[in-house]
Amino acid sequence: MPPKLRARLDLMFSARQYRFPMIAMWLCAATLWAQSAAGQDQPAPPVTGSGLDACSEVPRDDALPFLCVPPSLPESEEPSAQVPAQVPAQVEVTLNLPAGTPLRIVLDQRTRISHVDELVHGQVIEAVYAFDQVVIPAGSVATGRVARIEPVPAKRRVLSYTNGDFSPAHEYEVVFDTVTLPDGKQINIETTASLGAAEVVHLVSHPEEQEKKKNVAARAIDSAEQDAKDTVHQAVYQVRSPGRFERLKRFLVARLPYRRQYLEPGTHFNASLRAPLDFGMTTRTSEQLALLGTAPPPESLMHARLLLEVSSATATRGVPVVAVLTQPVYSPDRRLILPAESLLIGEVIQAQPARKLRRNGSLRVIFAHIETAGGKVQPVQGSLEGIEVDRAAHMNLDEEGGAHTTNSKTRYLSTGFAIAMAAVASRPDVERGAADPGGDPLVRAGAGGSGFGLAGGLISFAAKSTPLSIAFSVYGASSSVYANFLARGREVVFPKDTPLEIGFGAPHPSPQASQARR
């Protein structure tokens, strides 16, 4: 390095060595001068001694020996600017319902399926949540229309005629386009509704244990809120639960050869949103969301809906099953654990398709994980403890949550009656020593009715023909034997958006944890 360059660098380095101590000394002198100037305007504090005696108050236990605790001011004299209030952190939450969210609606007025655009009127029977807030309360009024009526296919019409039914039902489509909230606010919606279920039943696997879990969950909700929910539930229950007389009336009307097609009060629909709904923003404190995404408490009961259809005819062991929470889950101290729309992920562990000789199908599922909207996954142990299905499905739940279809208890009675009528109709009616070629009128009517219902009974009664009565009765007996004892059994089908009640316990230990305990 050239000597001149080295000398210049040495000079710069020595200048920096002297510059920084001089700046530090200047800052210290300025600080002492400011403190002395401020001290001249204020009276000196009283000093009664040295050491700890010189302090006006006793120091704290964790204070240094040479420090005194400054005297505290009364609350009325403390300046608010020096002690800012601690405000909990606020988190903004978007309230929206994604496309595909179903609205469970039950009709409260009778609607005839005769022409398109017929008005359909009903009520929402289950509150709809966005995150943890009700955005569409139960009891909201839903209105729509009959959007489409399909003609009856020729094949089904012929089969219906041969069974004495001259009014086969049309397939139809219903859409709901307006929801009116209890406060009078109207919301325009676009929906696609499933086919209506005439009567829905609620099946449970452990009625006593489920009632206990419901009571535990109810204690986490304010009593006023629970009373309001119970009031709405009772009002809706009266609409959707037809009495025994009404069910008997519908049964008899369904046996008539000619009848009109109606949507009766109590018919259930799942109206899925075709477009998302936005309900604005809300805020939650960090304390309220402190437990968000954690595991639910043991012995908790969750309400969910099935995301995709599951059937015993097509499902196999290991097929994934996905459900979506329809109600948020809270801790006992009312802090949110799982918001609505959290995913419950499980699988099929047993599936038996229906077989011949009326051997019905069975299906069993479990839920092993919960995934929140943020992607956090929690291992759980969940089983099916409740489900709402159409009464016509003839489904039951066993104690372990397995679903089975059952055969009607009246199949023996109906089949025995059909066989008896065939036997009686084949015997000649002898009165006063001579055979009546037409047979007994009551026997003729019964024989025709066993094969073709009310229409067959009337035809057989009017025809006064023993061979015709025998043919009708034999057809009825053979059809009854095949349908009740020889045909394929019923499948277990959980349609899309089926309401589920899932009970959760402690998660299964991992293999590593089990080996560590050993």
Image: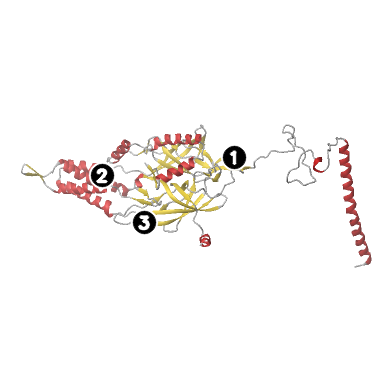
Q: Which is more toward the observer, 485 or 167?
A: 485
Of the numbered discs 3 and 1, the one sitting upstream in the chain is 1
Secondary structure of the residue carrying tag 1 is strand
- Identify the amino acid type marked 3: Pro
Q: Mark 1 points at which residue?
A: 282
Q: Which residue is denoted by mark 2 in the rendering?
A: 164
Callout count: 3
Q: Which residue is drawn at 88% across and 36% down?
A: 40
Question: Looking at the picture, which amino acid does disc 2 mark?
Answer: Gly
In the rendered structure, find residue 353 and report the number of the disc placed on it. 3
Q: What residue type is labelled 1?
A: Thr
Earlier along the polypeptide chain: callout 2 or callout 1?
Answer: 2
Res 85 → quadrant: top right
Label 1 CA crowd tier, 10 Å (few <14, some 14–19, many 20+): few
The answer to whether 187 appears left or right of 110 in the picture is right
Nearer the observer, 410 or 311: 410
